[in-house]
Amino acid sequence: MQIPATYTPKGVSFILHGRPKNVMKDHPAYEDIIAALKENDVELLEDITNISSFVAKITNGDVQLSDDEVRYKGTKVPEYLAVRMLEHNKEGLPIEPLCRFAEKLMQNPALDVREDLYKWMENGNMPVYPDGDFAAYKAVKTDFTPFNKGPYGQDQSVGKVVEMPRNEVVENRYETCAPGLHFCSYEYIPKIYSSESSNIIIVKINPADVLSLIHISEPTRRTPI
């Protein structure tokens, strides 16, 4: 018996084992799902649409997703991020970027950063890239060097990779202008820099590299990494 399905410009809806499934075109396995529907391959559809199996597959089994929790290599992912991942799954939103983000975040040795980073990002409207890195912002001089150069005040123009030793970054979240590579939310930049004397750049950051976050109740303050 052919699997009943309706195809729309936004995606496809079908019934599998008596349960409705709605898959949007931005689903990372959308083409595979369409192929399985055309072939009436129930077994393949079960594998593709089982979000737990899908998450395990794209993370080589490192991230496990159940109905009520998310784990990375057996360790619970911080509650706030886990809730968001489960909500994305329930609402049919793309979950792969958050899985990649969780993988990288859980490699960060700073426990307080693991607990607070995603909430801090949400408060600052910082999106997640498909590879799990996230976007933040930084004001630099018109020549793309930082205002407070220090020993690592290198060129930060578009396309550059900027680094400094992790052990030279001050991890105290209450010391706002401590040594480190700083980033912030877009909304905070106008409070401290004028558009005439600076360039605003987007920085792509690996969550494993974040060392310190300004207190969570002040999400738009500068943050060293």
Image (cartoon, rainbow, N blue to C red):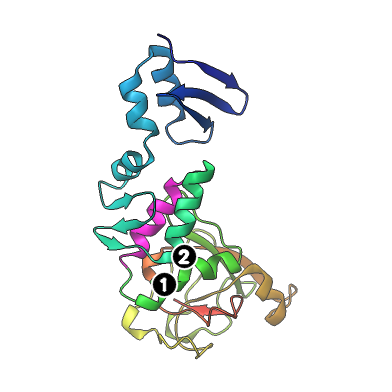
Q: Measuring from the top left, give residue 90's x and y in whole percent.
A: 49, 45
The residue pinned by badge 1 equals: 115
Viewer-side residue, 143 vs 221 = 221
> Distance of mark 1 from mark 2, alpha carbons?
8 Å
Q: Going 41% across and 63% down the picture, which residue do you hit? A: 206
* Residue found at x 61% / y 70%: 185
Q: Is residue 91 left or right of residue 34?
A: right
Location of residue 48 by image quarter: top left
Relative depth, front residue between 40 and 95:
40
214 lies above or below 185? below
At x 53% / y 88%, what residue is drawn?
177
Mark 1 or mark 2: name the one nearer the start of the chain.
2
* 96 falls in the magenta region: yes
Which residue of the protein is positioned furthest toward the front in this rendering? 18
Q: Judge depth for marks 1 and 2 and give the one in front.
A: 2
Residue 99 visible to an observer of this rendering = yes
Contact (Cβ within 8 Å) of mark 1 with mark 2:
yes
- Dominant SS of magenta comes to helix
At a point 27% along the width and 63% down the height, the residue shown is: 75
Percent of width and height locating residue 12: 54, 24
Q: What element carries label 1?
A: helix
User: At which x and y percent is residue 24?
Assistant: 54, 33
**Quadrant location of residue 91?**
top right
Q: Which mark is residue 80?
A: 2
Q: What stretch is highlighted in magenta?
A: 93-107
- Name the amino acid type tagged 1: Glu
* Residue 39 higher or lower than 34, as above or below: above
Q: Nearer the viewer, residue 215 or 136?
A: 215
Amino acid type at image mark 2: Tyr
Task: Give the number of the disc on residue 150.
Answer: none
As displayed, is residue 98 above or below residue 38? below
Q: Is residue 210 among the parts visible in the rendering?
A: no
